[in-house]
Image (spheres, helix red, strand yellow):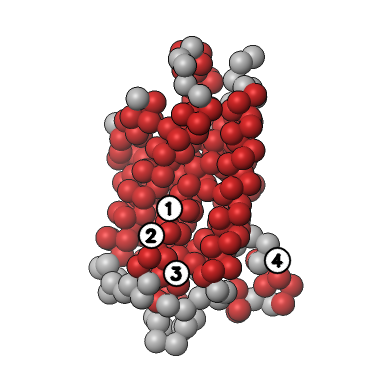
Amino acid sequence: MLLKKEILRFWRVAFQTIAAPVLSAVLFLVIFSHVLSDRVQVYPGVSYVAFLVPGLVMMAVLQNAFANSASSMVQSKIMGNLVFTLLTPLSSWHWFVAYVGAAVVRALLVGLGVYLVTLLYAPASFAAPLWIGVFALLGAGLMGVLGLLAGLWSDKFDQMATFQNFIVLPMTFLAGVFYSIHSLPGIWQTLSQFNPFFYMIDGFRHGFYGVSDVSPWLSLGVAGGSFVAISALVLHLLRSGYKLRN
């Protein structure tokens, strides 16, 4: 029931939570495709527009998964209705599955919407569909957990916005959405390899074209390890009632 409540929360304002992110991603595609499509080719046989599509889809997935769980938790704190959820016999696992599950649903809906619109600009290509599904679910899940962590830590929307603007947004834009890290100077290539968002986007792109900057197995290991580590921390905080019971 908590999962249903969380899904309905964003679905009732779908124009804002689903349609608006799709429009933002498509605007990126339109602008960059017109400016750079004839000047840049990242991988042999893959146009720059086609290269952009997986990155923009995954960027939308990551940002919306984070936004959903973080905003829901902070909103419940501010409005004071969190106490009614605390009165229920729900375990920390129930909370975890409900908040992260709703974030995954919203993220995948936005990602699918972005991809369907981008078909107008680049033909469909599925070199390894299994990798596409794995990284879409893993990326949405990881960011849903990270959003829940931010929501637990934040007491107001300003704090959540700080987390999003100074951590999530820069790491997303510097994760190879618009470029290959091989085009960067040496030090920036090295720094990019410490960014877990890069591995989610790179692994996801591998599923479409069969090419990537690093092995998809390495990307899976980094993204999976990050998901397990942050999930363990969030479950511990939920069990302890961190910033929930005071």
Q: Which mark is residue 205?
A: 3
* CA separation in Å, label 4 and label 3: 20 Å
Q: Earlier in the sequence, mark 2 or mark 3?
A: 2
Residue 44 image position (x, y, % from top left): 44, 87
Query: Depth check: 68 or 87 in front?
Result: 87
Identify the residue at image location x=49%, y=42%.
Answer: 144
Q: Which residue is mark 1?
A: 137
Q: Compared to 137, does 242 lie above or below?
A: above
Q: Which residue is mark 2?
A: 133
Q: Earlier in the sequence, mark 4 or mark 3?
A: 4
Q: Dots 1 and 3: beta carbons under 8 Å?
A: no
Q: Which residue is mark 4?
A: 191
Is 117 on the left-hand or right-hand side of 190?
A: left
How many numbered badges does the structure rendering display? Answer: 4
| Badge 4: residue crowd in 10 Å (few <14, some 14–19, many ≥20) | few
Residue 125 image position (x, y, % from top left): 31, 74
Q: Earlier in the sequence, mark 2 or mark 4?
A: 2
The type of residue carrying mark 1 is Leu
Question: Which of the two marks, 1 or 3, is nearer to us in this view?
Answer: 1
Q: Secondary structure at mark 1?
A: helix
Q: Secondary structure at mark 2?
A: helix
Q: Secondary structure at mark 4?
A: helix
The picture quadrant where one finds residue 210 is: bottom left
Q: Dots 4 and 3: beta carbons under 8 Å?
A: no
Q: Image quadrant for the C terminus?
A: top right
